[in-house]
Image (cartoon, rainbow, N blue to C red):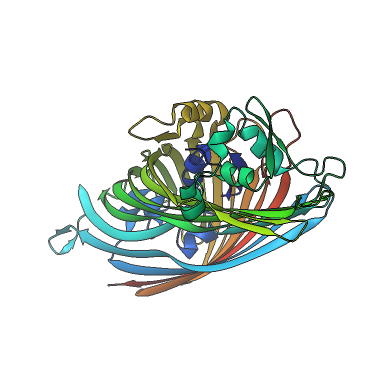
Amino acid sequence: MKKIIFTALLGLLIIKGNAQSDIDALRYSNTPTLGTTARSIGLGGAVGALGADLSAVVVNPAGLAQFKTSQFSLSFGTSTNRNKASYGESGDKTSFMFNGDIPNVSLVFTNRRMQRGNPAKKGWVNSNFMLSYNRTANFNRKLSYQSNSPVNSMTDYVAAYSRGLNATELDANDEQLAEGFYFFENMFWYTFLIDSVRNGNYTSTYDMVNGIASQKGNVATRGGSGEFNIAYAANYEHKVYFGGSVNIHNVNFTETNKFTEVNEAQMVGGWDNYSFTRNLETSGYGFSGRLGVIFRPNNNVRLGATLQTPTRLILSDEYSDELFVTRSDGTTDDLKTIDKEFSYDVVTPARYSLQGAYIFGKKGLITAELESINYSTMNLSTDNDDFEETNFSIADRYKPAANVKVGAEYVMNSFRLRSGFASVGNPLVEGGGKSRKIISAGFGMQEKAWAFDFAFSRELQTDEYVPYQINGATSPVVKSSFRSSRLMLTLSTKF
């Protein structure tokens, strides 16, 4: 598969060298969540030791055992994203994106053991069962950038990428001209954006004296991932809670990446500008499991631990490229590649987390969580073992990282006031310019038969994007500052 995707996702904007690469594994592995209910977001996602929250199943399923009555819950959320990108000396470009979703739908059934008409206090006192859907990742983001003084051209990259190919391999046959080109380098060759030198070497055809006048790009990603959860938890004498869940994952991701260059063409018939667009659609499903325990030594202290198994995702990519070239004499070429499909598996790392909380009676609480993920264990695979080199690269480029979450809640009768903070660890061994912090706040009302909660979170993130990379030459780097504001409302009723 000779295809390059330059991807912008999850705040980690890095070049990717093949149609499927380590970036695919990272996209579905680096998905820290503050939870899928307003209470969880208001507490910075640190609800693992608290339990009795509808999003606890994605943090610590043992918390499910702390529900005393059956309950239905529904959450509504919005995200407003702003991305400011700086490329060279041309100033900043800002992009915006807004979307809404339903991050959580949950149904909990409780089964309390009774003794002589009263709730049991010895042995296994209750067991609970949950069915839920949780939206665990949001891939919606837009990046725009521009430079009026680029140091080289993407056609330099294509020329280097094509090195070693015979010119006849780049020539378009009748089928390609009628149905679509096989690979993107065939289109660059056909439109004379690259030319042959000798012995399988190629060069760019832009004006080497005046250089490239400008470059600009737009990368838009959409989609998300979620979990259908079937969970069970049991309560032993209100001292120890055990829980587990089986999770069925769904994935939907699309990316449109458009890159434009303007040439200071001096020769008649030379190219004036071109736009190169890459389209990618990924869909699939997967499976994982989660086990959790919460220990309650007294009425004030809660201690929890969770193990999430690696997630195996079965994915399918559909992708194509488009190239539109305008020459200095006004003639144009509008080309595209054939539509391609490829199926593969991604295995994301296991997750281990420790949680703790201190309850101040009926006045409030503080809570914290530490999550560990070893990104070097990410893995891609096919039946033909196509990703051996990619997996070696993953082991070298990535490292273990820790996510830290803390939160606090103040209680005034039925009213709750909350705040939280989360720090997401950088998975890269070197570089990436990545930092990701989330602050949050919220409030809620808890009554006997119903409850509502509202939360706001603000994500602060910096990272870098490389549109293309040429060995032995300076690679362009787009520095990105990403801000995301999230609102969530959760409605719950007991039955």
Q: Measured from the top left, where is residue 165 in percent x and y?
A: 57, 30
Name the residue at 49% across, 37% down.
372
Q: Position of residue 2 (x, y in %)?
A: 51, 38
Q: Which residue shows up at 57% across the image and 43% down it?
A: 186
Q: Foreground: 377 or 233?
A: 377
Residue at the outermost left position: 116
Specify the quadrant of the image occupied by residue 490.
bottom left
| 278 left or right of 298 in image | right
Drawn side of residue 26 relative to residue 208, left or right: left
The x, y position of residue 267, in whole percent, is 82, 48
Count of numbered labels shown in the rendering: 0
Q: Can you say which quadrant of the picture contains the C terminus?
A: bottom left
Where does the image place residue 437, in percent across and percent down from the top left?
63, 50
Q: Is residue 135 visible?
A: yes
Residue 220 in which image quadrant: bottom right
Tell which of 480 and 266 is nearer to you.
Answer: 266
Task: Identify the image quadrant of residue 448.
Answer: bottom left
Is residue 413 something one can see in this rendering?
Answer: no
For this orientation, the residue located farthest to the front is: 174
Q: Residue at x 45, y 60 (%)?
A: 36
Q: Which one is in front, 1 or 347? A: 1
